[in-house]
Image (tube, rainbow, N blue to C red):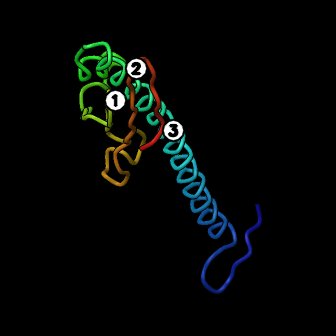
Amino acid sequence: MKTVRRRWGTVAGQASVELAGGALVVLLAGLVIAQLFLGGQQRLRADAAAKTGALAVVEGEDPRAAVRAALPGRSSGEVEVRSRPAGDHMVRVEVSLPPAGPFGSLGLVPPVKAAATAGSGTAEGGDG
């Protein structure tokens, strides 16, 4: 391979630097995509757990135990559950999960929160 000599270096050297920079951009983009995907999954888990907790209260059971049972393995360890009355014969259960993904453990992403309201045999969720 013939290299062209420039004033500050070679063309091959510049290509190596550009390749390394491009690889870092691709890596960062992959991490951001993974964070978005895992954050979405965590939101779905929080929604389902909040609905389960609200229905448990209506059935006379402990909402914290129901929420922990609804979450898979590791997710149930650091969950916060609050339940409070939400009007006539209604209860609101709020669930907060630690963020998932590559940036979640660094404290760069807020916790995932979801809430559900239930009463008289119904459950509504999805608001956070």
Name which residue type carries label 2.
Ser
Horizontal side of residue 64 vs 70, given as left or right: left
Nearer mark to the viewer, of 3 and 1: 1
The image shows residue 21 at horizontal and vertical percentages of 58, 62
The image shows residue 23 at horizontal and vertical percentages of 59, 54
Nearer mark to the viewer, of 2 and 3: 2
Q: Which is more toward the observer, 37 or 119?
A: 119
Label 2: how many residues lie within 10 Å, few (<14), some (14-19) or many (20+)?
few
The image shows residue 49 at horizontal and vertical percentages of 38, 25
Name which residue type carries label 1.
Met
Q: Which residue is mark 2?
A: 120
Classify mark 3: helix, strand or loop: helix
Residue with the most extreme front position: 88
Residue 96 position by quadrant = top left
The image shows residue 81 at horizontal and vertical percentages of 25, 32
Specify the quadrant that holds the C terminus: top left
Q: Which residue is mark 3?
A: 40
Q: Are marks 2 and 3 in contact (CB under 8 Å)?
A: no
Cα distance between the residues tagged 3 and 1? 28 Å
Q: Residue drawn at (64%, 70%), measured in percent from left and top?
A: 14
Q: Which mark is residue 64?
A: none
Q: Residue drawn at (27%, 32%), measured in percent from left and top?
A: 79
Cα distance between the residues tagged 2 and 3? 30 Å
Q: Which residue is mark 1?
A: 90
Query: Is tag 3's residue or tag 1's residue first in the polypeptide sequence?
Result: 3
